Amino acid sequence: MTISSAILREADHDRTVYLVSLLVLTAGMLRAWAHEEHRRLRFALALTALHLWLLPVVAVMRARGMENVADARLALMIITALAFIGIGGMLLFAALLPRIGLHTPRILRDVITAVAAIVAIFATASRAGFNLSSLIATSAVMTAVIGFSLADTLGNIMGGLALQMDSSIKVGDWIKSGDVNGRVSEIRWRYTAVETRNWETIIIPNSMLMKGQVTVVGRRQGKPEQWRRWVYFNVDFRHQPSDVIQAVEDALRAAPIERVATDPPPNCILMDLYESYGKYAVRYWLTDIPVDDPTDSVVRTRIYFALKRVGIPLSIPAHAIFMTEEDHEREEEKKREDFQRRLDVLRNVQIFEKLDEAELREIAPGLRYAPFTRSEVMTRQGAEAHWLYMMIDGEAAVRVSKDGVEKEVAKLHAHDFFGEMSLLTGAPRSATVVALGDVECYRLDRSVFKTFITARPELAQKFAEVLARRKVGLEAARGGLDAETQNRRVAAEEVHLLSKIRDFFGLSDDDHRTAAS
Ligand code: CMP
């Protein structure tokens, strides 16, 4: 018999054509449907290569009638069986089952493939006349060696299977175990891999996870994944805790904060009272667990701005000594600068353009400094809030909701103002205004304005004029009114708004007549 016919006979005997065809078919399917699994075919490819290498060796040995051909043939048969199992396993678990929506956990695939491989080795060996089981059973030393070496491995496999089956830990869970803190990236037959925030992958043997205590962060039966965080701050104890809590909770709940759950809402508590300050904590529920510090920082910034708006400073250590000498002159100078700043703001606001310098000076002391941080809602559509904001710095967006759809209609910057309608007529807010970054404003409250307008009722007419022009101007920008229609609308609005302003501030008809004259 020629060598080539011996090889062909051997190949026929060992189903080489089926093996190679199965490999090609599986590789094609994986490339098309599960590209990420394609790499895992390398082991089966190596076994097939080994098969193709052993095939001529066995054929030549058999043709020459060499005596240890039986051993070589057994090796070839075992390699062939393992290659079939490896490729078949990939075809079934990585290509076909996922196509019909069945995703087998990795560990189960590994264990099924390993068991099939062991059974195949034993079956092939016994068909060839080798009895491996009796060899193992009769050799006490070998049994002990295998037992010892497999003890840990078996513990890990059982641990891994148990973790998968009872779903106590799943891929994607954020866990804490000892010093390890991170997201489970895979559960294999021997270990569970955890990826940390520091871009490390920590390998934890499954048996350790089974024996030790593991915290699954953010998990609660029947609830969404979210994790409670604490953000601390201190406030001088001369400020009433109820005021601090109210200001902070209002600011945190007024507008959604990215990655902060609305249910349960963030809350603020007084933790303790110390010598000169109260220690407070904000508790909020984080919805994206890896992004903890940056979200704490956003919440802290909101707290800072909320307190600043209501004039409550964060505490300063009681033992701090301030060495700046605040003499009378310096104090006066600071006041003058502040007053000047307020006047400049008022001069640049269109709504006060008809007031003279003396009138502006009357209003200036009543302004209140009001800073906001990114995403805070400065004014909410539909709210009853009777004050006006004048922007000194930053950028804000005006958004109008109609039929449940919110649309941005304008952007506001330094020297812009908003909230004039509610301040002057008592109407609910017509739009929502949101800070796009840090925004600084002065706020003019109804009470301050009322004192002013009650003393100068004839100015109501001037405000009605400006308000009417602004209102029609905003409508024109949206609806494209021509000049003539605009003028007509301004005149009609003026009358309407004047009566509203008079009603809202309780001005009498005599005042109106004075104004009209
Ligand atoms: P007010 O209705 O009191 O509260 C919301 C404020 O948004 C409103 O007053 C105006 O000051 C302002 N506003 C409403 N629509 C626009 C717009 N299209 N452009 C600029 N500002 C607007």
Image (cartoon, helix red, strand yellow):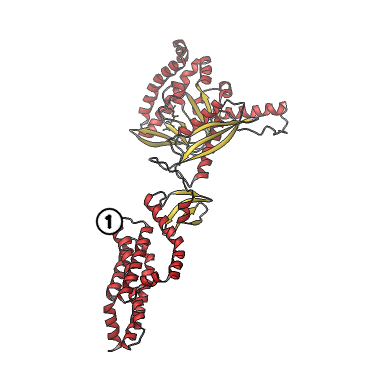
Determine if residue 517 is in view: no
Tell me where residue 450 appears, x and y as whole percent: 51, 18
8, 71: nearer the viewer: 71
Tell me where residue 112 appears, x and y as whole percent: 34, 62
- Left or right: residue 104 compared with residue 393: left
SS of the residue under disc 1:
loop
Query: Quarter of the image holding residue 317?
Result: top right
- Name the residue at 50% across, 44% down: 292
> What quarter of the picture does the N terminus occupy?
bottom left
- Name the residue at 53% across, 18% down: 452
Q: Which residue lies most toward the top here? A: 510
Tell me where residue 412 appears, x and y as whole percent: 47, 35
- Name the residue at 36% across, 31% down: 482
495, 35: nearer the viewer: 35
Query: Quarter of the image holding residue 25?
Result: bottom left
Residue receiving disc 1? 100
Is residue 503 positioned above or below 325 on the image? above
